[in-house]
Image (cartoon, rainbow, N blue to C red):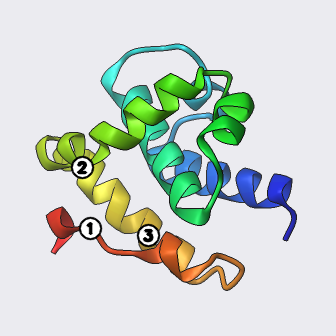
Amino acid sequence: MSKTELFDHILHVVAEETELPAGRILSKRRDTETVDARYLLVHFLSDTGFSPSYIAERIGFTERAVQKIQTHFDERLSFQKLLRINFEHITNKLRTTSELPPKALRTNSFCS
């Protein structure tokens, strides 16, 4: 699977699970649902091995914004119940995709 296909696959899974259009996830909107979906997208892309600079370029945010999302993901996950539920569902969906490296399938201590 190419980088573009892998990015698109993860974006599709996040969009499907959060019930938000991909365009909204990639937008600059700041409502909770959109921000949570964006955090999930960045998390799974990062864990799959995409660099912050590549993620930033593809989602239209700065590299610093991507690094901030990575840094604050676990904290946000601990406070947002729906984010945790979506995280678990997306993790399970991506587990069935054999092209993803094992690191992308790690579990999170908040979901145990």
Q: Is residue 63 above or below residue 44?
A: above
Q: Nearer the viewer, residue 49 or 92?
A: 49
Rendered location of residue 97, percent (x, y): 65, 79
Rendered location of residue 93, percent (x, y): 52, 73
Rendered location of residue 74, percent (x, y): 24, 49
Residue 78 is left or right of residue 68, and the answer is: left
Q: Mark 1 belongs to which amino acid?
A: Asn
The residue under label 1 is 108
Rendered location of residue 84, percent (x, y): 25, 55
Nearest-to-viewer mark from 3 and 2: 2
Residues under labels 3 and 2: Cα distance?
A: 15 Å
Do the numbered discs 1 and 2 sit on residues whose CB atoms are within 8 Å? yes
The secondary element bearing badge 2 is classed as helix
The residue under label 3 is 91
Q: How many marks?
A: 3
Q: Mark 2 belongs to which amino acid?
A: Asp
Q: Mark 3 belongs to which amino acid?
A: Thr
Do the numbered discs 1 and 3 sit on residues whose CB atoms are within 8 Å? no
Instruction: Check disc 2: other Cα within 10 Å, few if <14, some if 14-19, many if 20+.
Output: some
Q: Is residue 31 above or below residue 71?
A: above
Residue 37 is left or right of residue 59, and the answer is: left
Q: Residue at x 67, y 36 (%)?
A: 53
Nearest-to-viewer mark from 1 and 3: 1
Residue 100 is left or right of residue 76, and the answer is: right
Residue 60 is left or right of residue 43, and the answer is: right
The secondary element bearing badge 3 is classed as helix
Residues under labels 1 and 3: Cα distance?
A: 10 Å
Instruction: Check disc 3: other Cα within 10 Å, few if <14, some if 14-19, many if 20+.
Output: some
Q: Residue at x 12, y 41 (%)?
A: 79
The C terminus lies in quadrant? bottom left
The residue under label 2 is 74
- Mark 1 and mark 3 lie on one chain; the one further toward the N terminus is 3
